[in-house]
Structures are given as C-alpha cells and as structure tokens.
Image (spheres, grey):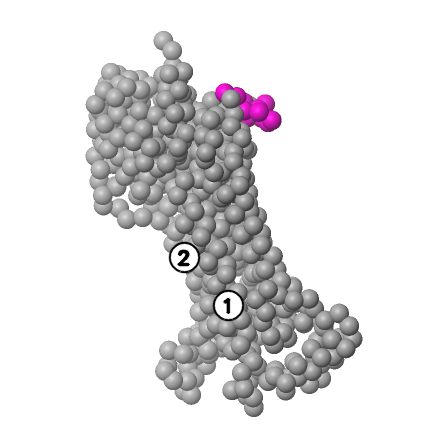
Amino acid sequence: MATPPLSNTLQTLSTRGLPLLPATPLNPHAPIAKWLLTNSALVLSMIHIGGITRLTKSGLSMTEWKPLGSLPPLSQEEWEEEFDRYKTFPEWEQRKSMTLDEFKNIFYWEWGHRMLGRVVGVAFVGPWLYFSWMHRPKLATGTASGSSSAASSSLFSSLIPKIPLNASSTIIPPHYQPRLALLCAMGGTQGLVGWWMVKSGLGDDRRGDRKEIRVSPYRLAAHLTMAVGTYSLLTWTGLNVLSYPVDEYVVKNGANAAKSTLSAAATPTTTTTTTAASNSPSLLRQYAKSLSLTPASLRHAQTLRIGTLHAIALTGLTIVSGAFVAGNDAGNAYNTYPLMNDQWIPWEDMVNPELHPKSRNLFETTATVQFNHRVLGTTTALSALGLAAYGLFHPAGRASAAFKQMTRQLSNAAGAVVPSTTPQVRRGLVALGTAATAQMSLGIATLLNYVPIHLAASHQLGSLVVLTCGIYTAHSLRYAGRGVLKSVGESAVKSVTGGGGGAGSAMSGIGGGSVIGKGSAVVSKMTNKVKL
C-alpha cells in the first residue's frame, strides 16, 4: 500500500520544521525579504553608532539640522567657522579646554550618525518604489531555473508551488504595502525625533547649569525606543516574507492537487489559502493541524510562545531603562556588583527631595535609574535562560518514536507525541539563552570597569542581539499563535473526523477516533480561551 501524501509531508515537517526560504526558486518574494533585512542591519548599525556618539559626548557638536544633510567642513576656515558656532551654545561653557582637533573628532561622529540615517532612508524608499511599480517576477515554467539543482535537493521543493505568481503580480507579497508605508513613516519620523532630542541640550535654559550639559534623558529614551521599534518591525517583516510560501501557499499533494494548488497560488492571499486549508493547507497550517492532535504538545508550544513574547517585552524595557542610564550617566556610580556600595538597595540615595513630582526619581535619580536597570537586566537574563530550559528539555518538545512511526504508518497514530518545537525554535532558544547570559556578563563588566567606551558600546549592541534572538524565536513559534490555530481549528477537525480524505480518513479507518476526538476538543478549547 502506497504511503499517503500527508505522511511524506509530516516526515518533512518533523525533520526540517518550518524553514525560512531565501532561495528565489522556492520563494519569489525572497528579494523583498533580503532588502528588508538589509535595512534592519543598517538600522542596527545606526543604533550602534548613535550609542558611540552618546558615549563620546558628540551629540551636541552639530548645532544645525538640515533635512537633506550636508558635507562636513572641508577647509580650515570652514572648520573654524563651525567651531565658533559651537562655542555660542551652552555645552561650550563646560568644555572650554577643547581644541579644534578634538572638536573635529566629535563632529565627525555626529555627522556620520546623521548621514547614515539618510542612507537608510534612500536604501528603503528607492527599492520600495522599484519593487512596487517597476519590478515584475520572472515566472517559472514547471521547474525552477538557475539554481534548480539546489532547489530540487531541498525536501521542500516537492511541496512548494513553482508558479506562485502571475505576470501582473508585484514581487511584494499581498497586503504588505501598508506595513511598508508604516516603516517608511517611522523612519522619517525618527529624524525629527532625533533633532527634537538634540535641541534639548542646545537651549538657553541650560546656561549656568551646574550639572553637565546633556540632552534630555526622556527624549533620548524616545529616540532609542523608536529606533528599536523600527528595527524590530523591519526584522519581523523580513522573516515573514522569507517564510511566506511556507505560511501561505497551499501544499502540493499529487499531480491533480498540484494543478489546483498552482491555480490557487497565482493570487496567494490569506483568504484563498485559508479556504483551501481543508484540502491542501499550507505547511504552517499542516504543522499546526498535526500539533492540535496532541494536547500536551499544544499546551507546551503555546506556553513557550507566551514566554518568548514576555522575554521580548522584558528586553525592550531593559533597553529603554538603559537609555535613562545613559541619559543620566548613571553607569559611572555604584561600580560594584551585586551590591550597590555595600547595599542591596541604597534607599537613602534613591529619592531626591528636590524633585517634584516624586515619580521623576524613577527616571532622573542616579541610584534609582541604575537599580531599575540592574533588576530588569537580571530578570531578562534569568527569564531567557528559564525559557530556553523549558523549551529544550520538556518532553513535549522532542519527537517521540511513536511520532516517527506515525509518519511511516498512520495506523500507529494513537498515542503519538507530536513535537511542540521545530528545529528553528530549538535553535532560537539556544541563541536566546546564550545571548542573554553573555549580555548580562557584559553589562556587569561594563559597570565594574567604569563604563569604558568599547565595553559600553558592545553592551548596547548586545541588547539588540538578545532582542533579535527573541524575535526569531517568537517568529519560529508562529504555528502556536491564536490566529493560526483558529484558522485550522474547524478545518482540521472537519478533515480528520468528517471523512475529508487524507490523514483524517486513514486515521478514522484505523481506530484513531479517540485521539481525533480529543484533539478536536483541545483545538476548540485552546483557540477560544487562550490569549496569545
């Protein structure tokens, strides 16, 4: 008896999970993903250079803002003119020993940071216009061209349609234009927020200030938060596009099914894919449907996804608290760990009676700001480690012998344990736990060494590495999301209990009804009551 098509699909999913597809023969949208991820790398570089600009106290060296940018001073006269302009602002009153060469050094950091922002804008808007109105995908004619050998060697080349777009399609996936417009708006607004931040350190109200002249920590935090938000959305969208065929294109199940699959995939919208899910679901929904048959695996995957989202939120809060540490130079005090000057909590230093309202102490008092960052950083690292352990060592996260047997012979489906974690999830958890541990160690080293620039800049960059690992892990767990489970819940139950063919018919004919009934109840309960 021939192996049913679903068995081959499950075998592929059990060994390879839900991979990202950067190869154009398997993913015609791959150029869009590469463009988005390139932009996310540019934004990451800009955040890193912005951190160095703050650490070198270069941010107030340019006292004018030109939306289109400008060349730096090119002659000695131009440099002296720029230096004289800088001397008319409050920061100069506290840095009168600065030489022209020292001014050039801080000026170039700020100028480079601003110009990189404009490079990011061009790198985003130019290709966006090109992909939207000029570029059209090259259609395959049955087999992939160019790197066909690489594609045919992939286990997924027999499942992903080879003609996913029609001649009038753009290479941008359906319904992605609004998100790209949002990203463009966020990038443009970031420049305005940056100048708004700089202006807080240039005003006449700072003259005579006995404290060191610096930008407002609130505006600094807003500037960093928006940059991190833009980076996160770029990364998430890029990963979505890399996985678009896996998530949205219906699976080819035989010669006749392949023909209808290609027809449906010619306009690959979510509605079309969901409608077809009862007969030929996408690989993402296929995995979610298989997972829904095992209550323990489903619960573990959903709990893991919630934990990952919480870890991402904690990472974001820690990054924002780090902006207040930088904005108040709070890292240059209490340079001991784990105690803060021989105290676990320096209560007497945490409230400044001169600040009103008292809530300002949370963001402006050195001891409180640093204490908050310590607590958030430690909590984030421990949460990431605990999450990694829970995901990697829980029995539901590993494929059992019964599951492997099920993929070969559906008669052994009863009692099978469908793995709740794919290889992508497991790699993400390892990376997240490792990065969080390294980041906490780097933060402690930065503090104990009185915030040297190279360690402090690496520490800020490390926070984005932790965030990236969290985003990748959460994306890899998308099959456990409420929306996906809800979309496959009814069709999965109908397919396996109502004689819809494929695995459902086979299982019902071999005495798998108890497992199917249990899975149906779990899908209904989990998708309606569990919030993700």
Callout 2: 10 Å neighbours few (<14), some, many (20+)? some
At 44% across and 65% down in the image, what residue appears? 375
Could you say where residue 266 lies in the image, as x and y percent from the top left?
41, 29
74 vs 305, left or right, is right
Q: Amino acid at mark 2?
A: Ala
Could you say where residue 483 lies in the image, as x and y percent from the top left?
31, 42
52 vs 32, left or right, is right
Q: Is residue 147 magenta?
A: yes
Callout 1: 10 Å neighbours few (<14), some, many (20+)? some
Q: Amino acid at mark 1?
A: Leu
Q: Is residue 514 magenta?
A: no
- Residue range highlighted in magenta: 142-152
**Which quadrant holds residue 259?**
top left
At 47% across and 59% down in the image, what residue appears? 186
Q: Which residue ends up furthest to the bottom in the rendered image?
A: 208
Could you say where residue 194 lies in the image, as x and y percent from the top left?
53, 68
Q: Which mark is residue 192?
A: 1
**Mark 2, secondary structure of its residue:** helix
Could you say where residue 478 lies in the image, as x and y percent from the top left?
38, 41
The answer to whether residue 267 is seen in the rendering is: yes
Above or below for 126 versus 54: above
Disc 2 target residue: 313
At 51% across and 78% down in the image, what residue appears? 200
Relative to the observer, which residue lies in front, 142 or 149? 142
Relative to the observer, which residue lies in front, 205 or 362? 205
